[in-house]
Image (cartoon, rainbow, N blue to C red):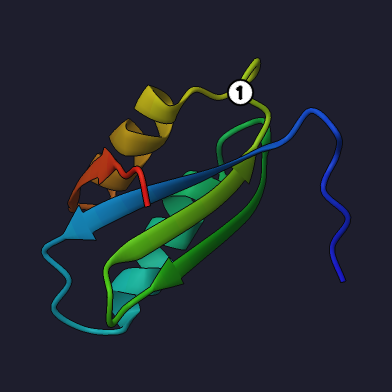
Amino acid sequence: MTTIPATSTHSLFRATGFSCPSCVAKIEKQVGRLEGVQNVSVKFASGRVEVDHDPAVTTTDEIVSAIGRAGYESALSAL
């Protein structure tokens, strides 16, 4: 079990443009490189990207940009 620091925030994003399960690895690699990101989980079937991160170090806009660098459009999701 991974322990998430107290300063961590759990953010949910919706990504579009998935065409194969290898898309998951591309997104996880790009987002996982960001400083302040503790965990990244991509759900291929639903297009959900869940990220545990320190918002003082990595903003949600930076995460959206990282998903974009992987080749997919995304947006912060309320649910």
Q: Mark 1 points at which residue?
A: 55
- Helix, strand or loop for disc 1: loop
Along the line of sight, the residue nearer the viewer: 6 or 44: 6
Residue at the spot 49% in from the left edge and 22% down from the top edge: 59
Residue at the spot 85% in from the left edge and 34% down from the top edge: 6
Residue at the spot 41% in from the left edge and 35% down from the top edge: 63
Residue 78, image x and y in percent?
35, 43
Question: 26 above or below 51?
Answer: below
Label 1: how many residues lie within 10 Å, few (<14), some (14-19) or many (20+)? some
Question: 75 above or below 7?
Answer: below
Along the line of sight, the residue nearer the viewer: 53 or 35: 53
Left or right: 22 with respect to 29?
left
Left or right: 28 with respect to 9?
left
Q: What residue type is labelled 1?
A: Pro
Residue at the spot 31% in from the left edge and 46% down from the top edge: 67
Along the line of sight, the residue nearer the viewer: 6 or 16: 6
Question: 36 above or below 55?
Answer: below
